[in-house]
């Protein structure tokens, strides 16, 4: 079976590489902890932005990064080991978030794996996903999140908002204060993302959900054929392999994004006429 996933980059590496979690789970867990350290520095040095948009990381041609992080009148881009050298005093909460049985960073001797090949594959998957998510994001006129990487849950996500307030979220996410969750979901959303997998669910997936979940959402007919609704997670899922192995991964992923959003928006009676725009048109409601 081809490893090209339907398309190739200009070099020899596949655009959508295979990413079997069982082959790189230890590296994935280590990268998750590393991104949490970086993200927590950004968290304490950046003014709060709605829905915690001041904490995520962003894709670049080199990997994941913060936007510039201010410390007084100075900026820096090296992390923890360089902070003392730079005389930048930063104190972070060293307990990881949103993971079971968290180990404080200074005590962690378990997360020390790094497979460079799979780390690069993960980056390539994020790059391709970011590209399609960005095209999807451009089709919406309403409030729209950036395409960003949340280090707590280790996923790349994009979120659309109806503009209407939502009922208080019940919270209960491990390692995340309920007030943070409630502020994040203060308004109605349709959200989608990519998650590389974890111990409890060792499969990379694309996901899509709505909050609050409209009646009938779980029974909605969405595309492509490989997508399904997970009762346990309360969201639609599309295995990464379904996208990677398709003749047109971009079209497969876009169909998933569009159909799950349309299901959420129609069932919740969003004002779609005033919230959407055809691809390639100026971002104007007129």
Image (cartoon, helix red, strand yellow):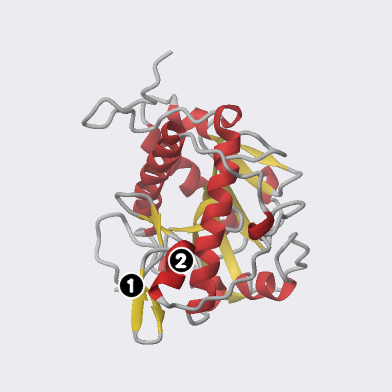
- Residue drawn 25% across and 56% down? 280
Rate crowding at label 2 as few (under 14), some (14 to 19) or many (20 or more) other CA atoms within 10 Å. Answer: some
- Residue for badge 1: 285
Q: Callout 1: few (<14), some (14-19), or many (20+) C-alpha neighbours within 10 Å?
A: few
Of 266 and 95, nearer the camera is 95
Q: Are marks 2 and 1 in contact (CB under 8 Å)?
A: no
Q: What is the tally of numbered marks visible in this picture?
A: 2
Dividing the picture into quarters, in which one does residue 96 lie?
A: bottom right
Quadrant position of the N terminus in the picture: top left
Vertical placement of residue 266 versus 178, above or below: above
Indicate which label's residue lies in the foreground, 2 or 1.
Answer: 2
Viewed as shown, does residue 108 lie left or right of 282?
right
Identify the mark nearer the N-term, 2 or 1: 2
Quadrant including the C terminus: bottom left
Q: Which mark is residue 145?
A: 2
Q: Residue at x 44, y 24 (%)?
A: 245
Secondary structure, mark 1, is loop
Q: Position of residue 89 (x, y in %)?
A: 50, 78
Q: Position of residue 72 (x, y in %)?
A: 40, 86
Q: CA distance from mark 2 to mark 1?
A: 18 Å
Rendered image: mark on residue 132: none
- Residue 192 in the image, given as x and y percentages of width and height: 53, 52
Taking the spot 56% from the left edge, 72% from the top edge, the residue there is 51
Residue 205 sits in which quadrant?
top right
Q: Measured along the vertical axis of the image, is residue 154 above or below residue 49?
A: above
Viewed as shown, does residue 277 lie left or right of 172? left
Q: Is residue 192 visible?
A: no
């Amino acid at each position: 079976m081809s490893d090209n996933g339907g398309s190739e980059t200009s070099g020899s590496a596949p655009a959508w590489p295979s990413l079997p979690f069982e082959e790189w789970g230890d590296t994935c867990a280590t990268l998750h902890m590393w991104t949490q350290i970086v993200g927590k520095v950004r968290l304490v040095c950046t003014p709060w932005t709605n829905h915690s948009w001041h904490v995520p990381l962003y894709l670049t041609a080199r990997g994941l990064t913060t936007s510039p992080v201010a410390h007084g009148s100075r900026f820096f881009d090296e992390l923890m080991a360089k902070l003392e050298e730079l005389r930048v005093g930063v104190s972070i909460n060293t307990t990881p978030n949103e993971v079971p049985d968290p180990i404080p960073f200074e005590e962690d001797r378990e997360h020390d794996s790094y497979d460079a090949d799979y780390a690069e594959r993960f980056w390539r998957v994020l790059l391709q996903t970011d590209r399609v998510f960005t095209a999807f994001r451009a089709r919406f006129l309403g409030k729209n999140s950036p395409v960003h990487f949340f280090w707590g849950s280790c996923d790349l996500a994009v979120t659309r908002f109806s503009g209407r307030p939502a009922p208080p979220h019940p919270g209960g996410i491990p390692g995340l204060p309920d007030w943070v969750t409630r502020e994040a979901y203060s308004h109605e959303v349709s959200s989608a993302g990519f998650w590389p997998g974890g111990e409890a669910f060792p499969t990379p997936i694309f996901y899509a959900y709505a909050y609050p979940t409209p009646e009938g959402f779980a029974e909605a007919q969405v595309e492509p054929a490989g997508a399904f609704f997970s009762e346990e997670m309360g969201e639609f899922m599309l295995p990464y392999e379904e996208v990677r192995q398709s003749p047109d991964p971009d079209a497969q992923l876009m169909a998933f994004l569009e159909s799950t959003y349309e299901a959420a928006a129609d069932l919740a009676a969003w004002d779609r006429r005033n919230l959407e725009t055809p691809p390639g048109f100026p971002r104007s409601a007129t």
